[in-house]
Amino acid sequence: MLLRCLHIVLLCCLGILPLRAQDVKSCLKELDRELEMKAQYDARKEMRIGQLRGVLRDALDDNGRYEATRNLFEEYKSYKYDSAFVYAQRLEELAARLDQPDRKMEAGCATVFCLISGGLYKEAFDMLEGLSTEGVSPPGLLAYYQMQVRLNYSARGYVQSGPYYERYSRDGAEYSRKILGLLPEDSPLWHEYNANFLMENYRYEEGIAEFSRLLADPDLDTHMRAIFASSVGYMLHCLGREDEAIRSLSESAICDVRSSTKETTALRMLAEYLSGRGEVERTSRYVHESFEDANFYNARLRKLEVGAVLPLVEKNHYDNLQRERNFLLTGILLAILLVLAAAIAIWFIRRQNRRLNEAQATIEERNAQLEAANALLAEANEIKSEYIGNSFYINAEFLDKMSQLYKMVDRMIVTRQYDELRRSLKESTIDKERDEMYESFDHTFLKIFPTFVNDYNALFPDTEQRFPAEGLTPEMRIFALIRLGISETDRIAKFLDYSVHTINTYKTRVKNKSWVENEQFEAEIMKIGAR
């Protein structure tokens, strides 16, 4: 490490350090400046979206509404996942009403785009399989093939190995060839998909040349420039040309910021590459910016991708600190005989490192405990909050009724209306109270577990499924109590005013009707509504 540092200093003194390093530094500084203006770009994006919403409100017919909805989807698809999905669904509804094959295909592909962005690959494959190409024009077929290419290569990147990897590679290449056969050769879109085909088939030098030709167009859309530059950066990294890769990824990230793109990979990749070069502060900032974008976009897959980089960044950060520490210790050991301060520095560094390790170990232990506790307490807190509020209401209502009863008894005793008092007490309302209690329990329970009835019925054959108009059946109520963690038969019997034998009989009869093994039935019940 010391020799390497001396070598770099010597090159700087001689003035022969490659200028490319300075180019990388300038690109990163420009990216830092653009990140400072991120809020302004996002504000412009929101203004455009607001204008498009106005156009949608003013649309006079389904054709106008379809065009306005499509424009809103285009604005949202790389900006906010939830909104993009909503407008994709509306596109499907409008396309169904317009009954035009091309628009049905376009709307279906919009939904598939959202599913791919969210990592819902199975659903995306199912959706594409259900799209009809009958009567679809060449542009509509092109959109369909584009989604097939995107989906197959995305799924391949997810599985990374095994038999499915080969299948996705083969299908992605097949649809890429269909696109190239459908487009006029040498058109920009032909070059785009040819470049993508070359990249996905590991022909990086040719892919870089194709993308570079596209990037040379001064009228290229900012968002597309970001995509092309990101692809070039990835291929340069695969070829080991790290400085060029970082420059390309910096350009891509700058374009992403300017176009308010939140579904982005460039900044995350840049953080990962810089982390390997010992860049600590920038790496941390970029990865956290990526995480903020992923949270804003709100697609689970993007959050997982950024989350996967965080441990690597922290590891590289830690390794960098280790290297720095070792370098300092070496220098101190060499100078310890001449400088008394060096000994103090060694003591200080060791003490700090010990505290750091202890703090890190404590944090890791606390985090593990908190994660386990949060998983267990999340559901319990929700149940507790709901039932505490409900209990206060029921208790207040019960106290009010008891107060009225006491007043009536006192009045009749004072007026010596003993026969009337006896007759009133015989007219017990306990059954009505119990029914109201069950109704309240059912209402509160179904508010916490709204899918309980459907999930419960899914454990039975169709002939044994029951869907009560309101509340729960007695059998469902038994297993609702079990779902809340009340497993003791005697407690369930007291709550439902049944005998223990009756409860056991109900449970056995229900389990015998289910297609689930009796021993596993209650475990399946506990899975209902679980996070």
Image: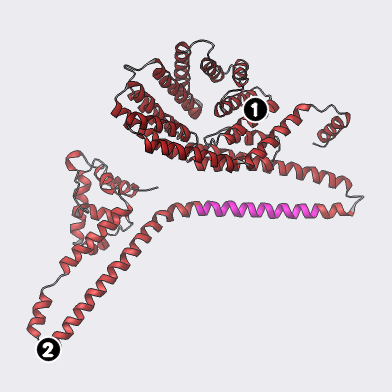
**Disc 2 from disc 1: Cα separation:** 96 Å
Under circle 2, the secondary element is loop
Q: Can residue 269 be seen in this view?
A: no
Instruction: Magenta stretch: give its range.
Output: 346-370
* Residue labelled with disc 2: 415
Q: What is the tally of numbered marks visible in this picture? A: 2
- The structure residue drawn at horizontal position 13% and vertical position 72%, both measured from the top left corner, is 428
Q: Residue at x 85, y 29 (%)?
A: 11
- Left or right of residue 49, residue 459 in this image: left
Tag 1's secondary structure? helix
Residue 260: assigned label: none
Q: Relative to the observer, which residue lies in front, 215 or 447?
A: 215
> Which of pointers 2 and 1 lies earlier in the amino acid sequence?
1
Q: Where is residue 51 in the image (x, y as percent from the top left)?
A: 46, 38
Q: Is the magenta stretch mostly helix, strand or loop?
A: helix
Nearer-the-camera pick, 390 or 311? 390
Q: Nearer the viewer, residue 29 or 61?
A: 61
Q: Position of residue 274 (x, y in %)?
A: 67, 35
Q: Is residue 173 at all visible to an observer of this figure?
A: yes
Q: Position of residue 435 (x, y in %)?
A: 18, 62
- Taking the magenta stretch, the answer to whether it contains residue 281 is no
Amino acid type, residue under disc 2 in the picture:
Thr
Q: Is residue 23 left or right of residue 17?
A: left
Q: Mark 1 points at which residue?
A: 248
* Residue sitting at the far right: 338
384 in relation to 124, above or below: below
Sort mark 2 into few (<14), some (14-19) or many (20+) by Cα contacts within 10 Å: few
Residue 300 location, x and y as percent?
A: 47, 39
Where's the N terminus, which quadrant? Answer: top right
Confirm whether the magenta stretch covers residue 367. Answer: yes
Amino acid type at mark 1? Ser
Q: Which of marks 2 and 1 is in front?
A: 1
